[in-house]
Amino acid sequence: MHEFVRARPGALPPGVVSMVGYRLRTAATDGTPPVHRGLPSPWLTLVVSTAGAVPTAVGPDEDPVRYASLVGGLHTRPAYIHQPPEQAGVQLALDPLACRDLLGVRAGELGLVEDADAVLGRVAERLRERVAEAGSWPAAFDVVRATLARDSSCARRDGVRPEVAEAWRVLVRTRGRARVRDVARHVTLGERRLETLFRAELGVSPRAARGLARFDAARRAVQRLALGRGPRTLADVAADAGYADHSHLVRDFRRFAGTTPTGWVREEVGNIQAGGHTDGPGWDHEHPREHPEHR
């Protein structure tokens, strides 16, 4: 069973780009749990699990660590979730520019995977308890929105430098097509100065952010291709996403996902067909299921 329900944009707290309720049942093969790749994207991740800890590793050959809830910073390689038989909870994609307000830290202070309890303290535990008791997806989404709003007192009010915020927005809005030197000129900073400030705030360089934005757009297009809703070939995906050719698309998939586009689709076909991988804004004509009570 694969169930993904996405909250409508009007139900999202400030700084939350998407919120998806999920309920999954997976079967182990030869006693080995299936492994899901948590792919890089331009968004931070907050997972509030209501079905026990989430075993997650930062490398394909590393032993997983069990997180009751987890936070993921911006990263350029996948996390590996060793999927238990039962999974349920709410996953949020967060704007890294809102990280200070939502999590009380800079996005640049987060690693690939962090224990949400260590970052949020009692807020993480309260979220798990109240989401588990919610009884429906609309109620669970309301709990998350109310909890994050009430606990914004943990926020750091020193603020993101406007040059960094604008540079990030341009890179994401253009889906990685803007050149870093042009972005630096746009925000009236030298490239080296922009990189220093950008890394400190967001944890990645402007070039890495550009790559994340382009890869995210390509991954969404590959998903639409697998569903028969968009590009006809991987060559079309590559061209639409701004890659020189199909081989450059495959190279980026290997870099960011650790596998090829076709390999990723083969691994994730069940999730894709059920409406998974809907983190982030509703770009690219995606139409994941939205709960009618949030229309």
Image (cartoon, helix red, strand yellow):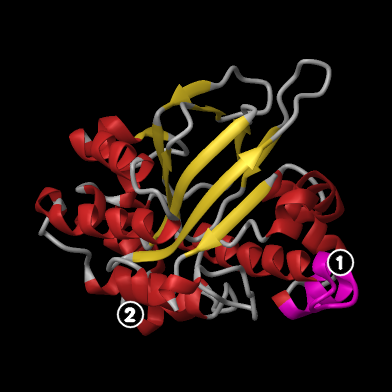
Q: Given this view, does label 1 or label 2 mark the residue nearer the observer?
A: 1
Q: Residue at x 58, y 77 (%)?
A: 283
**Residue pointed to by mark 1:** 246
Which residue type carries mark 2? Val
Residue nearer the viewer, 236 or 45: 45
Say whether residue 182 is visible.
Answer: yes
Q: Is residue 87 left or right of residue 236?
A: left
Height in image: 108 above or below 209? above
- Left/right placement of residue 241 relative to residue 92 reads right
Nearest the viewer among 187 and 125 is 125
Decide if residue 211 is on the left or right side of residue 253: left
The span picked out in magenta is: 225-240
- The residue that appears at 54% across and 76% down in the rendered structure is 179
How crowded is the residue under tag 2: few (<14 C-alpha within 10 Å), some, or many (20+)?
some
Q: From what the image shows, is residue 254 above or below residue 142?
A: above
Quarter residue 282 falls in: bottom right
